[in-house]
Image (cartoon, coloured by chain):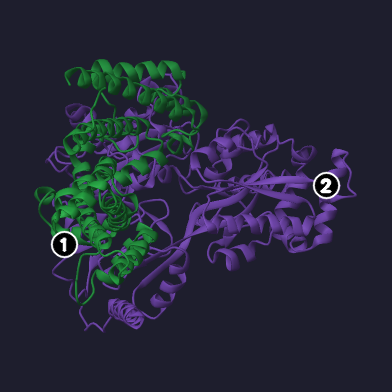
Amino acid sequence: MIRYVIRRFIEMVITIYLIGTATFFLLAAVPGTAIDKKIQKLPEQTKQIVIAKYGYDKPVMERYLITLKNYVVKGEFGESLVHAGDTLSSIVKNKMPVSSRLGIQQIILGVSLGIILGIAAAMNRGKIIDYVILVSVLLLASVPSLVLSLLLQQYLAKGPIFNLPIIGWPKGADVWFGGWKYTILPTLAGAGSYLAYYARLMKTSMLDSINQDYTLTARSKGLSEVDIVKKHVLRNSFIPIITVLPVAISGVISGSFFIERVFAIPGAGQYFIQASNDRDIPILMGLTLLYALIYLVTIFITDILYTVVDPRIRLVK
Amino acid sequence: MKKKLVSLLAIGLSCMMILGGCGKKTTEEKGNNTAKDSEQVLNTIYFDVATLDTNDVTDNQSSSILNAVQEGLVRIENNGKGDEIVPAGAEKWETSDDGLTWTFHLRKMNWSDGKPVVAQHYVDSFQRILNPDNGFAYSFLAYDIAGAEEYNTGKGSLDAVGIKAPDDYTLEFKLKHPLPYFVSKVSYTVFHPIRLDVIEKLGDKFASEIKDTVYNGPFKIESWDNGNSMVLVKNDTYWDAENVSLDKINMTDIKEFATQAQLFEAQELDISGAQTDYIEKWTEKADAGEFQKLTGEDPGSFYLYFNQKSESANGILKNAKIRKAIGLSIDRDVYTKDLVGRYQSAYGIIPTAINVGDEKYRDKVEGPLASDAKTYVNNKEKLQELFKEGLKELGLQADDLSKYELTYLSQGASELQKQRAEWMAQQINGNLGIKINVETQGDWGVYLDTMDKLEYDFTLSGWSADYNNPMTFLDIWISNGGNNHTGYASSEYDDLLASVYKETDEDKITEIYKKLENKLVNEDAVISPVYYTDKYSFYQNYVKDIQFTSFGSVYEFKHAYIQGKN
């Protein structure tokens, strides 16, 4: 086990290094810089002075080595070229909690409802309730989150019945556990896609397990359907769920772009897209590496979780 | 069973419709209320401030906020009749007979920490922005001052720069050539006074610090969530505080326009711009009295750039007559009135919002293309005749025009932009018979790069004024100018441009501007004007005296107040 962990750790470090390098050179290849709009109207000599100030006059390899040194030796991850004072740590402190809370609420709501509906559909296969679930889940999956957000905002906010806020998100002390009314509509808008996905996944997975030999054995032993589901089918059905859950969780951290945009939520999703448009290289580098790291760690944890859920799975031969 | 499903759906749909209907608000008649409201709070969209460092500002978002919390020699206000320069940090000023010396007499006022604002603080500001080690982008606006350009480019000393503070309340400038509109140039935010002691204490944090910094303007920044929201509150230490009514300004970032529209209609947002179909919808509502509408001129100009170095179609863009013919084959009135639904047709490069002295330049000088437009636009014969003359000058065949193919570079991938690009292509193809391909570049950075590298044929782009004078549009086109983007290099144009600075008489200067614009647009057909931009803002009935300026802040809050909100 220890050897496995060490080996995975080394692999992660190498992967992060490769991702970082690839990102740096890809970003350098894209035309346009963060300062383009700033210097557009300047006389030629002034342009050169500003370009030198931001280091864009140096060749790519030199910039790469400077960035590498800053990251590895100095632990400096750079400051935003566009928003004075924004650093990777300020983003993690201010924006990630917002996106994370939204994502976590979406996942809790979407996944749990989805699993319940999936189980209901599998256990009532062929009956009306199965079709109703199938159709509504399909509808939810097809409506883009942007459209769903706008619809919810238009019809459920500020109405005579609900009177939910049109925009906004809890601030300050409320960031994690307060200001629930702001979070209702955005959570609903985003839970839809998780609900749809997990309902179908759960149903298929359960039906698969129901057709296995061990279920037949359990039935012939005389166990009730409910007991069969609880003791045998469910546990085996969870493996595919666990596989995709980490990916969903990493998605939580990076934020839902459209929902944040429509409800004016100050999260990391919008920030990242905006940084791309602005060519805010230090922020893009920092956030890309951070997300890659989170993703890698989550996959690692998932692999460990598999052995817990299914003892048949071994980490190494 | 099936019937149950259908009825369920029907109920669901009708619920949504009823809720939708309930969502709309109708404004009621407010009773007559002449006193200001007790709550003086304004809700606007967020200004994306890039920096709070006065000398480092290059965009109108940062400058609008800094104009609200700081004050310079003058303030730009607009009561609906055009921008006015109003004394602020300076009470009055005069210039010597030769136009080379400007003296400003300062008003007694304090910073928010109690220290007085003195002339040295202005000197410090000019010296800091011109310091070559700082690399501040807008230093060039101070180049009319003697010794400024030399110091800023590392060729001269600080002592030779013509700025002095003979005493605490007098500021003196020595210019290198007379400039009647000097006050207009130094009105810009980057020349507001600064406190070197505060900057030294804050170091790198100066650009983003709101609590430990000093303010001398009508408002202060109370809180700032960078990228998302900002709150301004009244600055009680401001010299004119008794005439500032607003206590608080809440600014929230709303990127999705549908959301912004909903907030404005729910009266949770007090001022809003409008896009696409909202312009028409809200104009109707404004005319019906539900809220106010502000439309006006804007100092922006959009025109076709032609790449004179392009080798496409046997290099026909090298010829002035060909460029002129292409430019005249579009109907500007159709573009502005029918296709876009706003803006103003342009026959010159200098927009109507620009002044020469106290008068509007466009009132004195007609657009150079105006008279030719009357004979050429929509006249296929004349257009093709002009085009063929150009071809002959180049020694190319003029029998089959369809053999010539050019590419129109369009910026922006939205449906709207694509539609306008297609229209351009059709107009030129329909009138001249040449083939036009449309190439789209959605990303602004890539688009700018393409123009910079002269890798395009022709494109529509624009310029907005840095200050209130035609020079800001005319000096772009010097040979090797960084924003020229056309390959145009004419020593005659350069010499004519330089001759402006030798004159002090405004009429003589206007004559030179007229010659320059005619050479640029008509004789050499470097660009072809299409439209001048406009302003379109909507604001609630209870917001009074809010100002929208062309050269100052996007919103000028100093005199605004709330009256009659429920």
The subunit carrying tag 1 is A
Q: Which mark is residue A18?
A: none
Q: Colour of chain B?
A: purple
Locate the N terminus of chain B and report the quarter of the image it occupies: bottom left
The residue closer to the viewer here, B360 or B535, is: B535
The relative height of residue A235 versus residue B558 in the rendered view (above or below) is above
Q: Position of residue B407 (x, y in %)?
A: 69, 45
The answer to whether residue B566 of the structure is visible from this angle is yes
State the residue position of label 2: B403
The residue sitting at 68% across, 41% down in the picture is B457
Q: Nearer the viewer, mark 2 or mark 1?
A: 1
Q: Splitting the image into 4 quarters, where does residue B163 fall? A: top left
Q: Position of residue B169 (x, y in %)?
A: 24, 39
Q: Position of residue B68 (x, y in %)?
A: 26, 50
State the residue position of label 1: A181
Q: Colour of chain A?
A: green
Label 2 – label 1 distance at C-alpha: 65 Å
Locate the C terminus of chain B and report the quarter of the image it occupies: bottom left
The residue closer to the viewer here, B77 or A201, is: A201
User: Would residue B309 be found to the left or right of residue A117 on screen?
Assistant: right
